[in-house]
Image (spheres, rainbow, N blue to C red):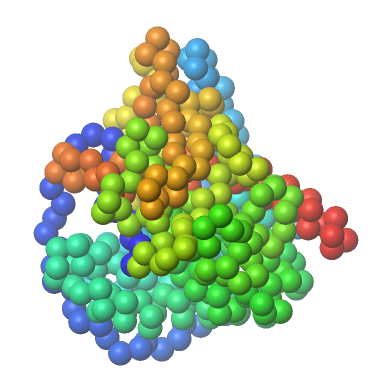
Amino acid sequence: MAGLLVAASATAQPTAPPPAAPAPAAATPPLAPNDYSDHANWLCWPGRNDACQSDLTTTVVKADGSTTVQKFVADPNAPIDCFYVYPTVSAEPGVISDMKVEAAETNVVVQQAERLTAKCRLYAPMYRQVTLTALRGFITGQLTMAAAAAAHADTGPKDVRDAWNYYLQHENHGRGVVLVGHSQGSGVLTGLIKTEIDGKPAQAQLISAILMGTPLVVPAGKDVGGDFQSVPLCHAADQLGCVIAYSSFRDDSPPPDNSRFGRPRNGAAGMEAACVNPANLTGGSGETKNYFSTRASLVAGQMQSFQWLKGKTIDTPYVSLPGLTTAACVHTGVFHYLAIHVNADPASPRTSTIPGDVVIMGAIQKDWGLHLIDANLFMGNLVDIVGAESKAWKAKNP
């Protein structure tokens, strides 16, 4: 179930009580397949003026308070592709979302994937996902896990499979591709890799899979096995055909016993959740190259009130805080996760904390960790990795 999950608030301040979730309707019969030859069924499509043509201008704030403005330039002729599946963001009233592009989908793809267009062409299908309404219903007991799972099996995974097959048949043309997902999106991509890629001909096109905010299962201490039989964990930026998977928690707030992230589903014996640190693929600690939205959290909540720099308003859509956050994979009991350390400096005019906690009725939900900013924390690292992978792919496939 963890692959379906994302929370409804990412603000750093206490939030108002969430609206009561209406009882979701029972799962409907399987829906007709989507036509992915219709580009209206894609959130992002290369060369089109859509969500992935948004302004990514960033204010870089150093520890001494000095700032520079960083412009973003996409590469329309990037030699590889990225295929992105977004997390649970739909606030529609039913169990399953429709195919209409809303602000929620636009907001999340801009934060989690658009910056990758500096290194790859980006394809992002719309899909009929399990909604935030269903998630609230599950949490409050109005919807059973069985009902959510049944609805999910008949929609999201099939939609993404159909989009993937359309992309392979009509757009790929032998190019390498990076799969990118978060939360529900990562869960769907895990299933896609299992059924359509792992040990199949399409594996030859797999540059890497970046599966954020999901408990990808591997045998303890091993790189392959568990969820995937022939797709290992990544250990180098130029390694091809591998997977990066992780879930983020503050280092001073490790996952509690009830956390959905950082441990294998169903407590499988001899297994653990994969933890690959994008800030240091070889192991150990590394600096995260963060990019935070100054305007909206992952699920469209407003972020303008967060004070990134004392006495100054950041007016660019994004802010980057070099040196503020570092990450390392940690084992704590049954959990294996990315521990995020904030290098706080109270004497600095720059913020000494970061947003990203899930807050409900003023209380931080520690079981979620920093799930909402799994991508924001490492976006610069991921761009660098995809760039290195692109060079390795071109060298191998001239």
Q: Position of residue 279 (x, y in %)?
A: 58, 39
> Where is 330 relative to 137, above or below?
above
- Asked where in the image residue 359 lies, by quadrant, the reply is top left
* Residue at left offset 82%, top offset 57%: 394
Q: How many marks?
A: 0
> Where is 321 relative to 179, above or below?
above
Q: Residue 364 or 328: which is nearer the viewer?
A: 328
76 vs 296, left or right, is: right
- Asked where in the image residue 26 lies, by quadrant, the reply is bottom left
75 vs 311, left or right, is: right
> Where is 364 relative to 133, above or below?
above
Q: Is residue 40 in view?
A: no
Q: Residue 339 or 325: which is nearer the viewer?
A: 339
Q: Looking at the rendering, in which quadrant would you find the N terminus?
A: bottom left
* Residue at left offset 64%, top offset 53%: 234
391 vs 45, left or right, is: right
Q: Looking at the rendering, in which quadrant would you find the C terminus?
A: bottom right
Residue lying furthest right in this view? 398
Q: Position of residue 233 (x, y in %)?
A: 61, 57
Q: Position of residue 379 (x, y in %)?
A: 54, 43
Residue lying furthest top in this view? 347
Residue lying furthest front in this view? 270
Q: Is residue 205 in view?
A: yes
Q: Position of residue 118 (x, y in %)?
A: 66, 47
* Residue at left offset 45%, top offset 86%: 33
